[in-house]
């Protein structure tokens, strides 16, 4: 695909927040997600000739960002210190969803990724399955388990507010 530098910059600017959310759903910190997105932009620029359809640029960029996030995650140590965990959600949601984004960030990484891609990025189960390299049934079960866990977490939050 022939993109000028300006066109590529415009596409990255438009889809950058999507790439970031996808990377952040895999990684535990904002800085790591930003690193993954930076790496993804570089990889996308270097492999721009492999993009066959301009209309597919959004899922293509998101997939590269997710792959870079997984690669970064594999390189990281398995130990995470509580002081290093973010205290706030990566991208604050609208006020009516305050507790929801915090609950999504608290999900295990596989469920958090499925929820972020499905609900925040509006990807289909099939697209997510292809992106993550897992069967559609796995994506569906991750979403179902995530919904159940979110429901439980949000009900606990309500109970905490009622006690105040």
Image (cartoon, grey):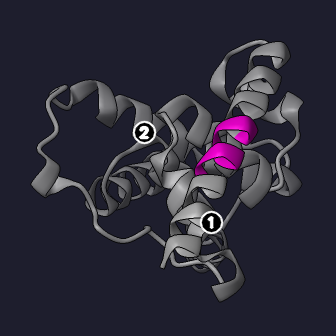
- Of the residues under marks 1 and 2, which one precedes in the sequence? 2
The residue under the point 57% across, 54% down is: 156
Q: Crowding near pointer 1: few (<14 within 10 Å), some, many (20+)?
A: few
Question: Distance between the Cα atoms at labels 1 and 2?
Answer: 37 Å
Quarter location, residue 38: bottom left
Q: Residue at x 43, y 68 (%)?
A: 90
Task: Let me know if residue 57 appears in the view.
Answer: no
Identified at 76% across, 25% down, the residue is: 139
In the picture as drawn, the residue positioned furthest to the bottom comes out as 95
Which of the 4 quarters of the picture holds residue 83?
Answer: bottom left
Q: Is residue 148 magenta?
A: yes
Observer-nearest residue: 39 or 127?
127
Mark 1 element type: helix
Q: Which residue is mark 1?
A: 158
* Viewer-proximal residue among 153 and 124: 153
Q: Main secondary structure of the magenta part?
A: helix
Going 32% across and 33% down the picture, which residue do you hit? 73
Give coordinates of residue 100: x percent, y percent: 63, 64
Residue at numbered disc 2: 68
- Foreground residue among 39 and 75: 75
What span is colored magenta in the figure?
147-153
Q: Which percent across, then down, holds residue 129?
A: 76, 24
Q: Secondary structure at mark 2?
A: helix
């Amino acid at each position: 695909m022939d993109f000028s530098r300006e066109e590529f910059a415009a596409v990255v600017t438009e889809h950058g927040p999507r790439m970031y959310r996808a990377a952040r759903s895999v990684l535990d910190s904002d800085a790591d997600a930003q690193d993954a997105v930076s790496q993804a932009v570089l990889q996308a620029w270097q492999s721009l000739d492999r993009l066959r359809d301009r209309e597919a640029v959004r899922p293509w960029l998101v997939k590269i960002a997710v792959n870079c996030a997984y690669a970064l995650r594999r390189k990281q140590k398995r130990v995470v210190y509580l002081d290093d965990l973010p205290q706030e959600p990566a991208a604050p949601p609208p006020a009516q969803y305050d507790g929801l984004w915090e609950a999504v960030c608290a999900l295990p990484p596989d469920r958090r990724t499925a929820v972020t891609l499905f609900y925040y990025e509006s990807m289909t189960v099939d697209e997510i399955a292809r992106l993550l390299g897992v069967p559609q049934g796995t994506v569906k079960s991750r979403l179902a388990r995530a919904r159940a866990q979110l429901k439980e977490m949000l009900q606990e939050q309500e109970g905490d507010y009622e006690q105040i």
